[in-house]
Amino acid sequence: MTESAIDPGVLDRGHVRLMVRGSRATIVLDRPDQLNAQTPDTWKALREIGQNLAPEVRVVVVRGEGRAFSAGLDRRLFESEQVDGAPGLLSLASSPVEQGDADIAAFQQGFSWLRDPERVTIAEVRGHAIGAGFQLALACDMRVLATDAKLRMAETSLGLVPDLGGTLPLVRAVGYSRAVEMCLTGREVDADEAARVGLANSVVEPEQLEDATDRLVEAITRSPAGAVRETLALLSQAEEAEDPEQQFAAERAAQLRRLRELMGGSGSE
């Protein structure tokens, strides 16, 4: 499938823009007047993009329009049974458990594809990335932050839990103890601390943010696509290996696949 299969109405309702140029796709949360607050339509649009990107796309950049990456959930989700036809928190609370589980699982699919080793994903973060915004940044493989970036996992302080896939990458990035402290206090993490604890790959001045992302994309796409894909898959599973031999075996298998492709002269590299 290709991005041409995406219903533009889905993107419009989710306030999401998609731009594809060659091997790069850029996803823009486009609701700057609301600091790119997210709704179920946002997650549907993200899911639609993930399901339809052309295989030629090797790198995906996610950013927010305006002065914030994303300030988190649209406040209407806390106040209404439905928001733009999708279930709000009141509806989820009163629905049968099976239905609520299915609804949240669908929301999570807007984030989970960003960890697919088929492509590298980069969050370009300026300003606030709060709650769902922080989880969207965490869903990406890498994060480039402006010096004005402010990260915060706000769900627990609101009586909720992070449920869009953010807990695992947060623990992987900063460790269990620090993740506990960030989530349970809901405190703000500035760009300097984010770089220090492993949440940011780099921090630059706001006016340099797009250029820094462009340079990172360029560096990634210099390497052969197959090698990037296999390496990303190895790294993503490394922490789940039960013992070193399991990872050694995965490396051997990946290397043999690469050698067969390279020596087979497929020309795909």
Image (tube, rainbow, N blue to C red):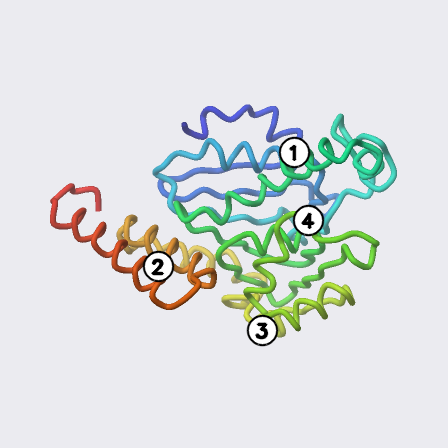
Mark 4–mark 1 Cα distance, whole angstroms, equals 19 Å
Mark 3–mark 1 Cα distance, whole angstroms, equals 32 Å
Asked which secondary structure carries label 3, the reply is helix
Asked which secondary structure carries label 1, the reply is helix
Check disc 4 and report the residue beneath it. 163
Asked which secondary structure carries label 4, the reply is loop
Image position, residue 183 (x, y; %): 72, 63
Mark 4–mark 2 Cα distance, whole angstroms, equals 33 Å
- The crowd level at tag 4 (other Cα within 10 Å; few <14, some 14-19, many 20+) is some
Check disc 3 and report the residue beneath it. 197
Image position, residue 78 (x, y; %): 84, 42
Residue drawn 45% across the image and 25% down it: 4
Dots 3, 1 in contact, CB < 8 A: no
Check disc 1 and report the residue beneath it. 14
Q: Is 175 left or right of 101, judged from the image as shown?
A: left
Dots 2, 1 in contact, CB < 8 A: no
